[in-house]
Amino acid sequence: DRLQYTDVVHVQATAYTHTDPGCNEITATGTVVRVGTVAVDPRLIPYGTRMFIVSDDGKFVYGIATAEDCGAAIKNNRVDLYYPTTQECLKFGRRNCTIYILGETELMN
């Protein structure tokens, strides 16, 4: 199976978890955080956008995700990827990533 995408966005990504200061388990859009939740600047990537995220160095594949949250430091081409533990967030660190904006039909045979 292949993913079909409609656009590509280059971003600087960091990671967050629900226990970080100022964070909790509910996103800005009212969903519960989970792996695949991404905090975005909704002026650049609208809430509800489905995407596939990979680090530019190829060492991390976050995979399929949805723009559901925001944060005070998340402006322009910055995103924050949700991980369930602080250790996973620290392992991810700060990386340049490519976001493939997924189209309506995501999987193709």
Image: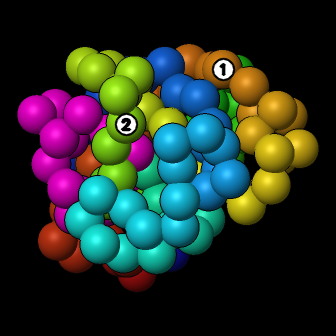
Query: As shown in the figure, which amino acid type bears the numbered disc 2?
Result: Gly
Identify the residue position indicated by label 1 in the image. Answer: 94
Residue at (39, 22) in percent of width and height: 73
- Residue 67, percent across and down? 32, 54
Residue at (38, 62) in percent of width and height: 27
Q: Nearer the viewer, residue 83 or 108?
A: 83
Residue at (10, 34) in percent of width and height: 43
- The magenta stretch is 39-53
Residue 89 placement, left or right of 7? right
- Residue 55, percent across and down? 62, 31
The residue sitting at the bottom extreme is 109
Q: Residues within 10 Å of mark 2 (few under 14, many from 20)?
A: some
Secondary element type, mark 1: loop
Residue 84 placement, left or right of 39? right
On screen, 97 above or below 96? Answer: below
The residue sitting at the front extreme is 22
Identify the residue position indicated by label 2 in the image. Answer: 71
The residues tagged by marks 1 and 2 sit, at their Cα atoms, a distance apart of: 16 Å
Q: Nearer the viewer, residue 23 or 105?
A: 23
Secondary element type, mark 2: loop
Query: As shown in the figure, which amino acid type bears the numbered disc 1?
Result: Arg
- Can residue 53 be seen here? The reply is no
